[in-house]
Image (tube, helix red, strand yellow):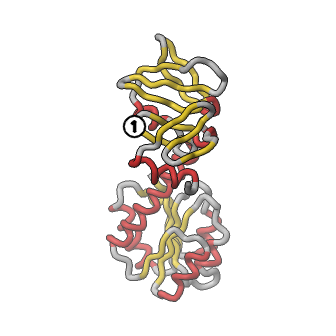
Amino acid sequence: MLNCMIVDDEPLAIKLLQSFVERTPFLHLSGAYLNPTEALSALDADVHLLFLDIQMPGVTGLELSRLVPLSTRIVFTTAFKEYAFESYEVQALDYLLKPVSYPAFLKAAIRAKTFFEQDTQVARETDASCLFVKSEFKLVRVDFDNILFVSGLKDYVRFHLADGRRPLIALMTMKAVEEKLPRNRFCRVHRSYIVALDKIESIERNRIYIGSELIPISEACQETLKERIGGL
């Protein structure tokens, strides 16, 4: 659920946006304000999304946008197309031209929802440092920093470790492993291999060198690998 706030000096515009918020299941209205100064005093980090009119007396929407918490994303609403460029200069998430239709509003709301979901996923991946896998009838902690690569064979996987221990064998699929490992640190390079990006020593043709191990890169995974490491 995204908490949102509306700031507009036109009561009818606020009423319209309120009705749109009520129609959108993943939005919750935290407040609606005619006065931008009052809105600023009520705005806190719990507000995810701010629907903000640009042209208002006293404090403009562009001026207000520079004062909101960094965690709050902005969708500008205005009747003037010429403000579009300025709205992106302040890193607005989207721009809605009045009169706002519900399809356009919903598109912006879905874009915001996707943004916050991705942001949450990145934070989760950044905070996590390990996973637990079931091996030999017990749960074993595997630190991400200790993983060189993962190889798969039918319903089993092997975690090849940097600390020199023998590979850890676990009863799970490669797909399940891929979902548990942070995408910013690991990449599926073959049907049977997932590699730690920071453990790659070199790449030659369709092969990855990690220590003395030679790992194939399948054609289907080449583009993904290029994106993750910034190009081969």
Q: Kindly identify the residue that appears in the image at 50 percent across and 52 percent down.
A: 118
Pinpoint residue 44: horizontal percent, then vertical percent: 62, 58
Whether residue 157 sits left or right of residue 90 in the image: it is: left
Count of numbered labels shown in the rendering? 1
- Give, as a three-letter code, the residue at label 1: Arg
Query: Quick one: label 1, few (<14), some, or many (20+) residues within 10 Å?
Result: some
Q: Kindly identify the residue that appears in the image at 59 percent across and 68 percent down.
A: 39
Using the image, determine if residue 115 lies above or below residue 214.
Answer: below
Using the image, determine if residue 187 lies above or below residue 168.
Answer: below
Q: Secondary structure at mark 1?
A: loop
Whether residue 191 sits left or right of residue 75 in the image: it is: left
Q: Kindly identify the residue that appears in the image at 46 percent across and 61 percent down.
A: 112
Residue furthest top in the image = 137
Residue 73 vs residue 131, the one in the foreground: 131
Pinpoint residue 203: horizontal percent, then vertical percent: 57, 46
Residue 63 vs residue 87, the one in the foreground: 87
Residue 140 vs residue 20, the one in the foreground: 140
Pinpoint residue 93: horizontal percent, then vertical percent: 51, 68
Q: The C terminus appears in which quarter of the rendering?
A: bottom right
- Report which quarter residue 63 is drawn in: bottom right
Residue where numbered disc 1 is placed = 191
Q: Kindly identify the residue that appears in the image at 52 percent across and 55 percent down.
A: 227
